[in-house]
Image (cartoon, rainbow, N blue to C red):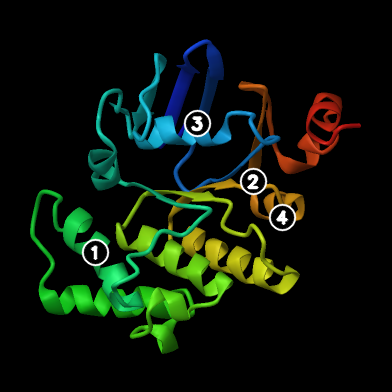
Amino acid sequence: MTSPLLDVEDLSKRFGGFVAVDGVSLSVKPGERLGLIGPNGSGKSTLVNCICGTLHHESGSVRFEGRALDGLPAHQRTRLGIARSFQLPRPFTSMSVMENVRIPLLYTVNARPGPKQSARAIEERCAELIQLVGLAGKARKWPRDLTQVEMRKLELARAMAAEPKLLIADEAMAGLSHSEIDDILALLMRLNERGITIILIEHIMRAVMSFSQRVVVLVSAKKIADAPPERIIQDPEVVRAYLGQ
């Protein structure tokens, strides 16, 4: 049996008297495509922030490749191989698309133990990533010159520049058109085919169901379901709690 890449056990997080995540456990296998869904306020973002190290949880544990991450700061978790993209892209506005992609290569990849990439190798990798996400013609543009879907692609390119083993894509399709959603889905599939494990957090159900091999559902800080998509959509508790029926 393959050991999990990510293993979250009985994780809980409070903000004062408010319980944001309540005893959630989940595991993700190497190469898996996992969907994470739930209504607004269900605890998805808090859970992900605890996994990535942006927040510190009160109880439970997070393990990555068998290593306990509890107490490890976010930048060290990134260097171990966990990267994320954000719903609201956060590029460096004073840098070009190419320069934005270069930053993770310099400060994450080259900060890892072992041989460092040369300046030429970094430039070639930047060009490869920009080509991969479909922004080859925009390499010298500023973020302000990009469309909404191009900004999402830049966000994914920056996450991939950290050369992650696990990519957490946080609502990468919010506000996009039908064709743009398909474009992002195709890009995520290409990344997964390259061996990247992906957790997709998304409210667009058709995107989650078509992309995910397994779906985890959070409601009111608790995990209520963890199953393949075809079972999730037939789960009465999910239908009642998430779809409001």
Q: Which residue is mark 4?
A: 210
Q: Look at mark 1 in the image and give the residue it sits on.
A: 103
Give me the C-alpha separation between circle 3 and circle 4: 25 Å
Q: Label 3 is placed on what type of residue?
A: Thr
Write down the quadrant of residue 237 in the picture: top right
Q: Quadrant of the C terminus?
A: top right
- Marks 2, 4: nearer the viewer: 4
Q: Is residue 4 visible?
A: no
Q: Are marks 1 and 4 in contact (CB under 8 Å)?
A: no
Determine the residue positioned at 31% across, 69% down: 101
* Residue 46 left/right relative to 96: right
Label 2: state its secondary structure.
Answer: loop
Tag 1–tag 3 contact (CB < 8 Å): no
Residues 171 and 6: in front is: 171
Q: Is residue 232 left or right of residue 68?
A: right
Image coordinates of residue 65 in percent, x first then y, are 33, 34
The residue carrying pointer 3 sits among few (fewer than 14), some (14 to 19) or many (20 or more) residues within 10 Å by Cα, namely many
